[in-house]
Amino acid sequence: MRIRFGILSVVACTVSLVACQANPGPAPVEEPTTATATTTATETTTVETEAPKQDRETISIGIDPIRNGFNPHLLSDDSPLVRDTASLVLPSAFEGNQLNTDLLDNVEQVDETTVRYTIAQEAQWSDGTPITGSDFEYLRRSIVAGTGTLNDSAYSAISEIRTSGGGKTVDVIFEHPVADWHLLFNNLLPSHLITGNSTFQTAFYDSIPASAGRYMVRSIDRQRGVITLSRNDRFWGANPAHVEVLQFNTVASASRAGEYLRTGQSSFMNLSPQETLVDTLNLVPDTEVRVSDTTRTLELVFNAEALAPAQRAYLTSLIDVPLTAKLAGGRSANLGVPQTVEASVDKQEIPALRLAADPADDAGLAAARGIVDMLAADGIKAQVVTTDLNSAIAGNFDAIVAWTRTATDSIALADRVGCGVNLAKWCAEGTTEYINGVLAGEIDFDPAWEQQFNTENHLRVPILRETRVEAKNNGILGAADGWPGGISSAASWRKNDVEE
């Protein structure tokens, strides 16, 4: 059976940088319930490239503070900013359900377990190195071997990757059918530049060393909170970027966001809500504002190996989710609180608990501390341990507070409940059988299945849905309806010189 996929209009993006070694995450630090947050200084890493000309056309974009790294395949790095940067800089086999015809000449499903990718001859990284099957193999190998990686279940189903035709023909062989295979091999990484002491977890902390999209990373300045992307002049595909420089600037407050848009210092914003942010932006003349939820949720995830089902159910009953959401978000406006179902449960003996939270995640840390106080009100001893997410996953904690991706497809669902890869350390024969059926396409993906599964097993307590506030003034032109379509579409933006 041969299946050909149609053409897509947009391409994944590219970056060209000098590789730089990342700083390791912080060592675990145990803190009592009353402990205060600790601020850790971060280094500034600037990628040395040709300085931009002063007359280069630039669009300034407001963003949240920079946290963690820029590897789009790590749960610890996952954020709207990282996703947007990857979409502008890194190449993907598919964009949505459409073949990326800039990167690939063709994709064929040769049989049930073999997919053949034919890479375009001209496809190259920004340093001139061709994109080949080595980049496919590096991504698969790194995700399977890593901790806290995304799409682990599906990549683990790949038994072999064979390359021929000078590296441009790539045969991906699966051990068993994976129906949503087109979701794989997005945001390919420049494998030829990951050398020395760099690892999958650290190599992309302060840089993306090469690009194969319409933009490339020029610099990441953590101290100033500035990221600069330059148009990738080696991009070989159709429709290169219009604007030469995209500069992302951290916006610290609602009033400052409004001032930047009002004065034209910024043309676009993508920010986490604050109490008065939407009200502030709606008052700015000639500004459009949109509020929407993403597919990420802040969750408390119990360790199924450490706590029995009855204990997990009892702990869940003690958590005031709406209050915890307020504490995590630091607001009551634009607060996406997941629905909770109250149930009568028997009191349980609970041992002293250790909850892990990433110190770089303000929302997660605030939620964890609030939960510890709620448990203390019932006489349960608990404490927050601040550590990076990868260490938390590898460690022996009773629960983790972290942002996770909602299961919107079979592959994401397998990551959430499949044996060996999920944060809850859950593994059950019945669940595995169901997940394998969904992955193979033998059972239809049902977004409501996990909710019922969690109601029965009490593995996760959803706390806060991620909400984004986007705003634009008349400094840029985008889609036909006047709205640019989000930062990921910035390659198609044009600067609107209102003075002309």
Image (tube, grey):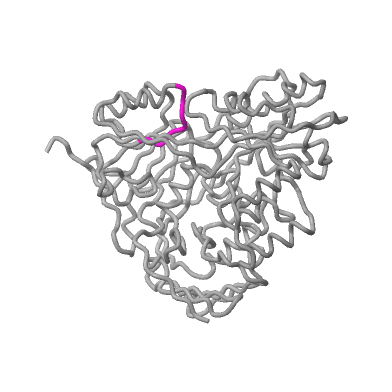
Q: Is residue 131 visible?
A: yes
Q: Is residue 194 magenta?
A: no
User: Between residues 194 and 360, which one lies in front from this camera angle?
Assistant: 360
Furthest toward the right, the residue is 349
Residue 192 shows in the view: no
Q: Quadrant of residue 375?
A: top right
Q: Residue 280 placed where, x, y %?
A: 36, 23
Question: In the visual, does 255 lie left or right of 365?
Answer: left
Q: Is residue 132 above or below residue 309?
A: below
Residue 438 appears at what percent x and percent y?
64, 62
Residue 292, image x, y percentages: 44, 38
Vertical position of residue 252 compared to residue 17: above or below: above
Q: Nearer the viewer, residue 108 or 31?
A: 108
Residue sitting at x 27%, y 46%: 478
State the residue at coordinates (59%, 72%).
Answer: 161
Q: What x and y, as percent, mark residue 82?
A: 48, 45
Q: Is residue 405 left or right of residue 279?
A: right
Boundaries of the magenta span: 269-275
Q: Residue at x 47, y 47 (%)?
A: 83
Instruction: Please name the residue shown 59% across and 33% down the image.
Output: 361
476 sits left or right of 76 in the view: left
